[in-house]
Amino acid sequence: MKQKKSCLKCPVCDSELYPVEAMKLYKCHHNHCFDMAKEDYVNLLLSHEKKSKNPGDSQEMVTSRQSFLSKGFYEPISDEINATVKAYFERVNKCPETFLDLGCGEGYYLKRLIESLDYAETKYYGLDISKSAVKLASRHHKAAQWLVANSFFTPFMTQSLSGILSVFSPIDMGECKRMLDKEGVLIRVFPETNHLMQLKEVIYPEIKVKEYEQYLNDLEGLEIISVKNVAYDITLKNEDLVQLLLMTPHFWRVKEENKEALLKMDTILVTVSVSVGVYQQPRRHFF
Ligand SMILES: C[S@@+](CC[C@H](N)C(=O)[O-])C[C@H]1O[C@@H](n2cnc3c(N)ncnc32)[C@H](O)[C@@H]1O
Ligand SMILES: [Zn+2]
């Protein structure tokens, strides 16, 4: 029987990579092998694709994010992602064959997406460069294949994915365009200018605002079909605040005295404000 085409790509020779369940490994036609870890994730990151020994978010960042997210503070974002994915595939009238969460962290959004959809045939993947994040994801969520890999050199074949999700993660739009099939969709969640503004006001003497338009202009040949704002306020207790600070890059950028000012606060009201952008391959226009 002919083997079904695989969407995974060998990071060494670029040929298709297949799971060999009995041997708990992935293997390509040229016999490059990648063992599955005991938690069932697979590490496809080659040493020249990483800049440090343990790239990506540290164990501490990952566990802080897991605790923070488990309290439901970002549930409205996750719900909007789920509704957007469902609406897209209803509109194109098909179920996704393959779906990737790029920069998935410890898998909060992908887990909730899988639970909210009833696509029995869809193969789900979560990819992150942080081994700590992928380990945690694969320990708790068995419905997806979790991969340690780099979003900028992804181990996916060209036009092999029906959907890609990216939530607050570094992204190469050109690489997304390459991986998406003709009707594929990219759902990208990025912060609006006022996202977590009250927190930034405490920790930064001067707030450098990342141009919001930058996210809308960074297309690399994809088209934006919609952008929806999700905004609401949350009240954080000191413990939540510490976790939020630890899970973001702010923690590493902030001066010690500014960090301390924030960590002394009992509660703070913070605005969550993000955009959920929907991108697809350009449509062919016939005139
Ligand atoms: C802000 S976190 C977002 C995680 C998750 N999407 C969430 O929102 O809960 C960014 C994630 O991107 C990962 N990351 C950073 N650089 C990466 C790269 N080059 N390739 C893949 N993942 C990367 C980090 O390890 C981290 O898990
Ligand atoms: Zn190979």
Image (spheres, rainbow, N blue to C red):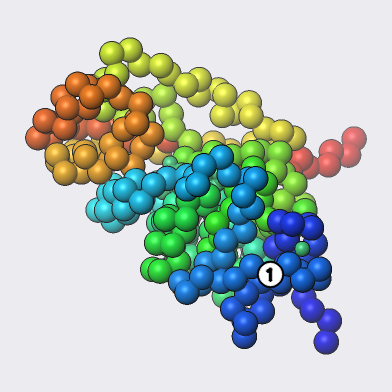
**268 w.r.t. 193: above or below:** below
User: Ligand 2 lies in which image quarter?
Assistant: bottom right
Secondary element at tag 1: strand
Name which quarter of the figure residue 12 lies in.
bottom right
Residue furthest to the top in view is 206
Name which quarter of the figure residue 188 lies in.
top right
| Image point (38%, 34%), residue name | 249
Which percent across, then down, holds residue 218? Answer: 64, 29
Q: Answer with left or right where residue 102 lies relative to residue 210.
A: right
Amino acid type shown at disc 1: Cys
Question: Disc 1 beta carbon < 8 A from ligand 2?
Answer: no
Numbered marks: total: 1
Along the line of sight, which residue is nearer the eye, 236 or 46?
46
| Image point (23%, 24%), residue name | 256
Q: Answer with left or right where residue 64 lies relative to residue 103.
A: left
What is the quadrant of the N terminus in the image? bottom right
Which percent across, then down, holds residue 68? Answer: 27, 49
Mark 1 highlights which residue?
33
Q: Answer with left or right where residue 154 lies relative to residue 234.
A: right
| Image point (63%, 45%), residue name | 49
Along the line of sight, which residue is nearer the eye, 264 or 195?
264
Which percent across, then down, holds residue 39? Answer: 46, 71
Disc 1 crowd rating (10 Å Cα; few below 14, some 14-19, many 20+) is: some
Q: Answer with left or right where residue 285 lies relative to residue 212.
A: right
**232 w.r.t. 18: above or below:** above
Residue furthest to the right in view is 287
- Residue 84 is at least partly visible in this image: no
- Residue 17 is at least partly visible in this image: yes
Which percent across, then down, holds residue 245? Answer: 28, 36
| Image point (90%, 35%), residue name | 287
